[in-house]
């Protein structure tokens, strides 16, 4: 009980620190404390950190309840990360000021995860993640989750090694940018087994700790609010997952009025095997009834597709080719493509290099070097 109280104090301390720092963008993250506590290699859950394989997706969608809490008792549940990033279109191009702190708890009936950026983009960072999950419902298969978290959807939205995030779930329609893959404050109910999972939640602000209580409906703060849901078939011992994801919400417009929107998407993912490369595909259709306060609706479409395969198995190096398209239904069609080379350099040190090209644009280069450090056991 004393140790549990200490961990709650740590989590609340990180939450309190976020109140004094500005907003930070969402960042993918692996869990080196899990690898250390259970004596496993990172490849148990990842094809290449932070991209998840079938077992890793199972751990993620159960809110870590699929792990044995007894083996986590002696683990110091805090780890830190440092990222050096490069972007040929950035200002500055190189950014070394990216330091993150995580606190992760695994207990018989509850789990939590808090990620606070101490420094991000060479500036004071913000709160990325802060959720608590009660996992004691329906024989351990049901979960109630509260806090700031990724919305229900495929694992590759939040846990993927590519430099660029996926365009399809973040398509902009008029004044509104879809937030299917964003970390937002809200609550979620989930039920899952070792064969499938169903999730549904209500979400609002993407801000720091101050966003937890911000649910105002006035257009002045342009708060995007809505429901998001996901249903997925996936076994932890099989490389294939398929699912449906969607949302329904409203967004206040600067000119007055609201854009009421909805989107539905289908996805599939196959992990690489000895005979076949890995692949993922996502296709989305959206409807916005008033995207620019003009009274004219828009029907959007978007897709993301990627093929990826190991080229240096010893270092778990993945080469990926991605193609994406977004059509906002208002005359703007964007086609993009990326090539990513990601790999583990040494234990908790990972890197990715990306070349990107958009229609009518010049090549864009990006990359990162990411080091994570757990702190052993009590």
Image (cartoon, grey):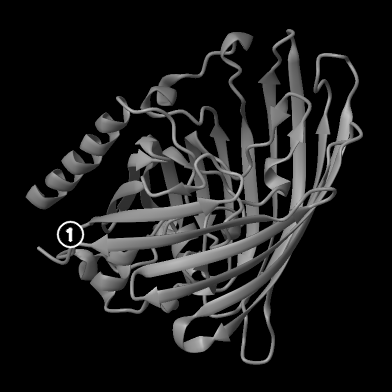
Is residue 280 visible in the rendered structure shown here? no
Is residue 35 visible in the rendered structure shown here? yes
Residue placed most toward the observer, 172 or 261:
172
Quarter of the figure with residue 138: bottom left
In the image: residue 232, left or right of residue 7: right
Q: In the image, residue 154 lies at what x, y percent? A: 61, 57
Residue placed most toward the observer, 211 or 137:
211
Question: Is the C terminus in the top left, top right, bottom left or bottom right quadrant?
Answer: bottom left
User: Which residue was labeled with disc 1?
Assistant: 76
Q: In the image, residue 258 lies at what x, y percent? A: 73, 16
All told, the count of numbered labels is 1
User: Residue drawn 70% across and 48% down?
Assistant: 167
For the residue carrying disc 1, how many other residues have a C-alpha within 10 Å: few (<14), some (14-19), or many (20+)? some
What is the residue that sits farthest to the bottom in this orientation? Answer: 275
Disc 1 is placed on an element classified as loop
User: Residue drawn 17% across and 39% down?
Assistant: 9
Q: In the image, residue 347 lies at what x, y percent? A: 33, 75
Q: In the image, residue 376 lies at what x, y percent? A: 16, 66
**Relative vertical location of residue 236 with respect to residue 172 in this rendering, above or below:** below
User: Residue drawn 43% across and 62% down?
Assistant: 369
User: Residue drawn 73% across and 24% down?
Assistant: 175
**Relative vertical location of residue 243 with respect to residue 278 in this rendering, above or below:** above
**Relative vertical location of residue 186 with respect to residue 273 in this rendering, above or below:** above
Residue placed most toward the observer, 324 or 200:
324
In the image: residue 295, left or right of residue 6: right
């Amino acid at each position: 009980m004393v140790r549990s109280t200490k961990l709650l104090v740590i989590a609340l301390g990180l939450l309190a620190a976020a109140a004094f720092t500005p907003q930070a963008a969402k960042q993918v993250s692996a869990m080196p404390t899990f690898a250390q506590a259970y004596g496993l290699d990172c490849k148990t859950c990842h094809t290449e950190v932070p991209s998840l394989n079938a077992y890793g997706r199972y751990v993620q969608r159960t809110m870590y309840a699929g792990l044995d809490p007894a083996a986590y008792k002696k683990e110091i549940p805090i780890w830190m990360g440092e990222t050096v990033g490069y972007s040929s279109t950035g200002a500055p191009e190189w950014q070394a000021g990216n330091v993150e702190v995580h606190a992760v708890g695994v207990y018989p009936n509850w789990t939590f995860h808090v990620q606070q950026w101490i420094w991000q983009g060479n500036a004071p960072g913000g709160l990325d993640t802060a959720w608590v999950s009660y996992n004691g419902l329906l024989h351990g298969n049901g979960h109630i989750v509260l806090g700031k978290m990724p919305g229900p959807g495929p694992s590759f939205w939040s846990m993927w090694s590519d430099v660029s995030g996926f365009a399809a779930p973040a398509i902009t329609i008029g004044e509104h940018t879809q937030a299917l893959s964003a970390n937002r404050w809200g609550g979620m109910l989930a039920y899952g087994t070792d064969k499938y999972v169903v999730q549904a939640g209500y979400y609002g602000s993407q801000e720091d700790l101050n966003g937890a209580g911000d649910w105002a409906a006035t257009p002045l703060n342009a708060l995007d609010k809505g429901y998001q849901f996901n249903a997925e078939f996936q076994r932890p011992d099989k490389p294939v997952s398929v699912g449906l994801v969607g949302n329904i919400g409203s967004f206040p417009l600067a000119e007055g009025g609201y854009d009421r929107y909805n989107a539905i998407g289908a996805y599939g993912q196959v992990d690489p095997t000895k005979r076949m490369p890995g692949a993922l595909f996502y296709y989305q259709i959206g409807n916005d009834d008033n995207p620019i306060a003009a009274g004219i609706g828009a029907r959007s479409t978007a897709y993301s597709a990627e093929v990826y395969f190991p080229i240096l198995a010893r270092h778990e190096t993945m080469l990926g080719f991605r193609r994406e398209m977004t059509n906002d239904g208002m005359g703007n069609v964007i086609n993009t493509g990326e090539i990513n080379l990601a790999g583990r350099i040494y234990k908790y040190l990972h890197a990715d290099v990306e070349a990107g090209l958009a229609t009518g644009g010049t090549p864009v280069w990006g990359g990162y070097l990411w080091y994570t450090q757990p702190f052993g056991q009590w």
